[in-house]
Image (spheres, rainbow, N blue to C red):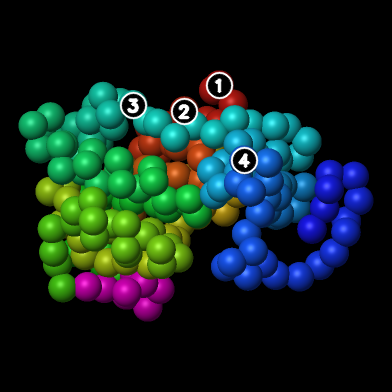
């Protein structure tokens, strides 16, 4: 507990003694030289290596549709279900990752030792809100059928990584650009609210 100048105490808040959300803020330390400023669970600002960033809770559905079509051959009319799932993913305060794969069934089998394979079911916004609380990615086919949750992605390090972006983003980049892994498009929602659509042809983080 701090008044902004000094630390006044260390402890836990009880459910009946919560501070006034209008005048209280929370700082979460998310890694080395990284922290996030929140108010009532809403991210106001994230700082990494001294660089402040404002949250970006929106994504370009048109861009996602284009990437799905170019990478996986998904028809524009068939992208609506996937976009609905992504809309729900953006609501998750802790961040999440949705992988759309051209070979979701085979990948669920290959990654079964580092994921939780499930009986295939059509992913909906309501279901996504529940399963995304589990660490790891959600693995979908191109028709938004879920084959695994809590997936820990593999892959080889490459020049498209960005150490400033954290483990979730970099694991997505490694996965989509590793030879032998089926084509996929990943939507990565970071804890600081940053949203990235990652595909094999994604430009480097610095835009060059």
Residue depicted at x 37% and y 30%: 59
- The percent coordinates of residue 107 (x first, y second) are 27, 63
C-alpha separation, residue under disc 2 versus residue under disc 1: 7 Å
- Residue position for label 3: 60
- Specify the quadrant of the image occupied by residue 149: bottom left
Eye-nearest disc, 3 or 1: 3
Q: Is residue 31 magenta?
A: no
Tag 2 residue: 203
| In contact (CB < 8 Å): disc 2 and disc 1 | yes
Q: Residue 57: where, in percent of width, then height?
A: 44, 35
Q: Is residue 200 visible?
A: no
If you read the primary sequence from the N terminus, does the residue marked by circle 1 or circle 4 appear first? Answer: 4
- Tell me what residue is drawn at x 53 percent, y 43 percent: 42
**Which label's residue is closer to the chain start, 3 or 1?**
3
Q: Residues within 10 Å of mark 4 (few under 14, many from 20)?
A: few
Residue 14 drawn above or below residue 25: below
Element type at mark 1: loop
Q: Residue furthest right?
A: 6
Q: Earlier in the sequence, mark 4 or mark 2?
A: 4
Q: Which residue is mark 4?
A: 22
**How far apart are the two marked residues, 4 and 2, measured between alpha carbons?**
40 Å
Q: Range of the magenta residues?
A: 111-118
Q: Is residue 102 visible?
A: yes
Query: The residue tagged with tag 3: helix, strand or loop?
Result: loop
């Amino acid at each position: 507990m701090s008044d902004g100048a000094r630390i006044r105490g260390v402890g836990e808040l009880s459910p009946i003694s919560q501070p006034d959300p209008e005048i209280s803020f929370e700082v979460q330390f998310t890694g080395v030289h990284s922290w996030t400023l929140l108010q009532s669970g809403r991210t106001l600002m994230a700082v990494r290596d001294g660089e402040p960033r404002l949250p970006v809770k929106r994504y370009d559905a048109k861009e996602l549709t284009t990437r799905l079509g170019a990478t996986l051959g998904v028809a524009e009319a068939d992208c609506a279900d996937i976009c609905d799932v992504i809309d729900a993913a953006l609501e998750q305060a802790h961040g999440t990752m949705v992988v759309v794969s051209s070979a979701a069934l085979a990948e669920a089998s290959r990654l079964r030792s580092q994921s939780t394979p499930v009986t295939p079911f059509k992913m909906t916004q309501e279901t996504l809100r529940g399963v995304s609380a589990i660490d790891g990615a959600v693995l979908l086919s191109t028709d938004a059928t879920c084959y695994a949750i809590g997936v820990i992605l593999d892959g080889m390090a490459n020049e498209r990584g960005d150490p400033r972006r954290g483990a979730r983003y970099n694991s997505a980049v490694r996965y989509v650009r590793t030879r032998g892994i089926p084509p996929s498009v990943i939507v990565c929602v970071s804890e600081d609210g940053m949203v990235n659509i990652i595909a094999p042809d994604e430009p480097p983080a610095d835009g060059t």
